[in-house]
């Protein structure tokens, strides 16, 4: 592990006010794909992990019954809450929570995460995927920095000192080990993509 969740929280607190200003086309494509694939049915509860300033959670609030945004950075969460207030979105709850301790009560139908899980080590990602599976969602949509080919630290999508992206293969294995079926793989760039995982059985079965 390169950094602890609290280290990441402090790092994102410092850049929270400017976070929305500098976004790559690949990041925006990922946001669009995660939102499109999440597709809640109007009644469902959606949990967004590593919610940041709310790009995914806010975009999906209108289509969900309830949205829970969880993050380790109070600064990022504060930006998200301000946007929810400005947009008069009331079915959303932004609070502290982390991948392996999401701080959630009650049923969760869909879990999303965008550009956040790469902050965890591969072992921690596996643990996080097990925790997510344990919440019983019918679907988990993961947009992130991930390697479709060879890792290339020269590319702009990650910094080895603070980020630890996984290969698509490792993520696919972790998801299937947690009894998700991988139902879509959307490459956005050699190092960025979206995976859609659905429960084939269990609490969230369709
Ligand atoms: C690059 S931002 C992405 C934010 C948002 N999902 C988006 O698409 O704009 C990464 C976020 O992950 C959060 N984060 C890092 N490690 C985390 C962890 N272990 N649990 C929850 N959030 C975490 C950071 O605080 C930050 O807000």
Image (cartoon, rainbow, N blue to C red):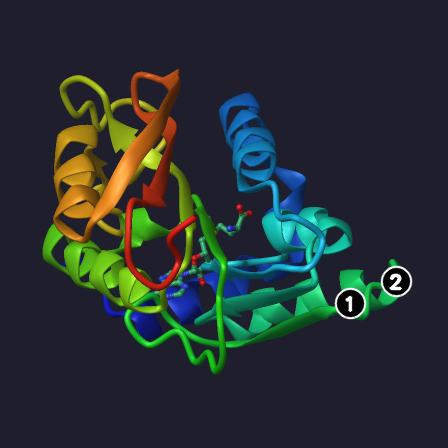
The label on residue 82 is 1
Q: Are marks 1 and 2 in contact (CB under 8 Å)?
A: yes
* Closer to us: 85 or 197: 197
Residue 11 x/y as whole percent: 42, 63
Task: Classify the position of the N terminus by image quarter.
Answer: bottom left
Instruction: Answer with the quarter of the image where residue 155 lies.
Output: top left
Residue 79 location (% of width, % of height): 69, 64
Q: Residue at x 70, y 46 (%)?
A: 59
**Left/right of residue 18 with respect to residue 147 in the rendered view:** right
* Element assignment for label 1: helix
Horizontally, is 71 left or right of 77 in the view?
left
Q: Depth check: 168 or 17 in front?
A: 168
Q: Secondary structure at mark 2?
A: helix
Q: Residue at x 43, y 80 (%)?
A: 103
Q: Residue at x 78, y 60 (%)?
A: 83
Q: Quadrant of residue 7?
A: bottom left
Q: Where is mark 2, residue-wise?
A: 86
**In the image, is residue 27 above or below residue 177?**
above
On the rendering, which quadrant does ligand 1 occupy?
Answer: bottom left
Q: Label 1 neighbourhood size at 10 Å, few (<14), some (14-19), many (20+)?
A: few
């Amino acid at each position: 592990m390169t950094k602890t969740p609290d280290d990441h929280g402090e790092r994102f607190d410092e850049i929270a006010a400017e976070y929305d200003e500098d976004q790559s086309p690949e990041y925006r494509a990922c946001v669009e794909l995660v939102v499109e694939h999440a597709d809640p049915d109007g009644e469902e509860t959606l949990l967004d992990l590593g919610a940041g300033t709310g790009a995914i959670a806010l975009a999906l609030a209108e289509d969900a019954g309830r949205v829970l945004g969880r993050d380790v950075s109070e600064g990022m969460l504060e930006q998200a809450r301000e946007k929810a207030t400005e947009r008069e979105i009331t079915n959303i709850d932004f609070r502290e929570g982390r991948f392996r301790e999401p701080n959630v009560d009650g049923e969760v139908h869909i879990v999303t995460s965008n550009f956040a899980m790469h902050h965890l080590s591969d072992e921690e990602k596996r643990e996080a995927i097990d925790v997510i599976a344990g919440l019983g969602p019918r679907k988990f949509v993961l947009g992130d920095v991930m390697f479709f080919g060879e890792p290339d630290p020269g590319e702009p999508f990650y910094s080895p000192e603070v980020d630890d992206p996984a290969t698509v293969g490792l993520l696919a294995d972790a998801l299937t080990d947690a009894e998700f079926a991988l139902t879509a793989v959307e490459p956005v760039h050699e190092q960025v993509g979206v995976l859609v995982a659905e429960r084939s059985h269990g609490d969230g079965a369709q």
